Image: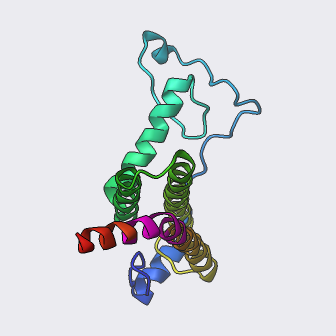
């Protein structure tokens, strides 16, 4: 059983499956490139009534992105672990005086792992929303594959960090041991 799966009784699963689906949202307009004018928003108060609407400006887009990062950091243990390990790898690279190209490779690798973890969180949330609390084989496959993508990125990051940081770290330890 995965960490995010909750066992449910067959009676609960049956009652969940028998419930009608929630009403569908309002139909999406053909052109969503500009949000419809809402008179309550004209006072300068920005509301996000529907998640599918395009943000009215770039600043609001960044606000939504930061909200996603904050959510992942606050709720996802693995995201916090990746942030800490990535920060340590960058700090170690600075301490070992790695060149700009090596630091860029480390930074891009850390960014790739964090991006994969965010995508994993998004996929898990959408799958959970879709199947609610019922078990479905395809939901399990989607969640497992997303988690596998994070694992592949994490292994690649270990290889990158090991090849860039380990040789100078070993040389430093040997130098300190001889003195």
Q: Is residue 179 left or right of residue 115?
A: left
Q: Residue furthest top?
A: 43
Q: Residue at x 41, y 18 (%)?
A: 45
Secondary structure mostly seen in the magenta stretch: helix
Left or right of 52, for residue 76: left
- Which residue appears farthest toward the right when viewing the image? 30
Q: Residue 24 appears at what percent x and percent y?
A: 61, 50
Instruction: Name the one closer to the observer, 40 or 32.
Output: 32
Name above or below for residue 59 compared with residue 169: above
Q: Quadrant of residue 166?
A: bottom left
Quarter of image, res 119: bottom right
Task: Please state, as top left, top right, bottom left or bottom right, where the N terminus lies in the image.
Answer: bottom left
Decide which of 34, 152 is in the foreground and name it.
Answer: 152
Residue 26, placed above or below residue 150 = above
Residue that appears at 40% across and 54% down: 72
Quarter of the image that includes the C terminus? bottom left
For the record, the magenta segment spans 158-170
Residue 74 x, y percent position in the rendering: 32, 54
Check residue 120 for magenta coloring.
no
């Amino acid at each position: 059983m995965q960490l995010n799966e909750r066992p449910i009784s067959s009676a609960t699963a049956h009652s969940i499956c028998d419930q009608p689906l929630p009403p569908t949202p309002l139909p999406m307009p053909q052109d969503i490139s500009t949000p419809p004018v809402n008179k309550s928003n004209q006072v300068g108060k920005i509301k996000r009534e529907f998640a599918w609407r395009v943000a009215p400006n770039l600043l609001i887009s960044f606000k939504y992105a930061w909200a996603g990062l904050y959510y992942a950091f606050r709720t996802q243990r693995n995201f916090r672990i990746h942030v800490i390990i990535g920060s340590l790898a960058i700090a170690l690279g600075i301490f070992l005086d790695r060149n700009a190209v090596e630091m860029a490779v480390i930074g891009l690798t850390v960014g790739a792992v964090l991006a994969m973890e965010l995508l994993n969180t998004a996929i898990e949330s959408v799958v959970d929303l879709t199947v609610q609390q019922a078990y479905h084989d395809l939901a399990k496959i989607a969640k497992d594959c997303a988690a596998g993508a994070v694992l592949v990125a994490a292994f690649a990051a270990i290889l990158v960090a090991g090849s860039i940081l380990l040789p100078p770290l070993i040389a430093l330890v040997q130098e300190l041991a001889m003195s």
